Image (cartoon, grey):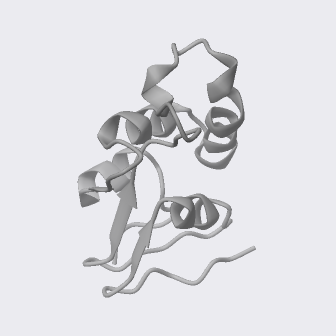
Amino acid sequence: MAVPPLIATSQIDSGGVDLFLAGVERTMQDGARIGVHSWSDGTNDATDFPRDSLEHDQNRQYIEDMVGSDDFYWFTIEAAPASSIYEMTNDEIVRFGLLTAPIE
């Protein structure tokens, strides 16, 4: 599945990032914005659970399946609480392998 490219005026956040990662081809023009944050169970944020807690398994495994490592999962839950959004830099987007081609 190819997802539409992120054009310079695109902004995806939260679950939109998860959907974007499902694409086989993931491209982005400079200026597009990607926002991430922790998940919450309604009472606790992901960071409230120890790293080896089963609560992390499903989301962590999805990220690993999509980008080859779970490093991006741990980054997202530490970047901002569930009630906020952290806008990633281009360097972070590249570092975590969110794209399948260089930023245009």
Quarter residue 1 falls in: bottom right
Which residue is most to the right?
1
Q: Residue at x 60, y 12 (%)?
A: 52
Q: Position of residue 20 (x, y in %)?
A: 58, 67
Q: Which residue is drawn at 55% across and 32% down?
A: 70
Quarter residue 60 falls in: top right
Image position of 67 with respect to 100: above or below? above
Image position of 41 with respect to 19: above or below? above
Between residue 35 and residue 39, name the one nearer to us: 39
Please state, as top left, top right, bottom left or bottom right, where the C terminus lies in the image: bottom left
Position of residue 75 in the picture relative to residue 64 (left or right): left
Q: Where is residue 49 in the image (x, y as percent from the top left)?
A: 52, 19
Position of residue 94 in the picture relative to residue 53 (left or right): left
Image position of 6 with respect to 58: above or below? below
Image position of 92 with respect to 3: above or below? above
Q: Position of residue 8 (x, y in %)?
A: 31, 85
Q: Position of residue 77 (x, y in %)?
A: 42, 37
Q: Which residue is drawn at 55% across and 69% down?
A: 26
Position of residue 16 in the picture relative to residue 47 (left or right): right
Q: How many labels does the image show?
A: 0
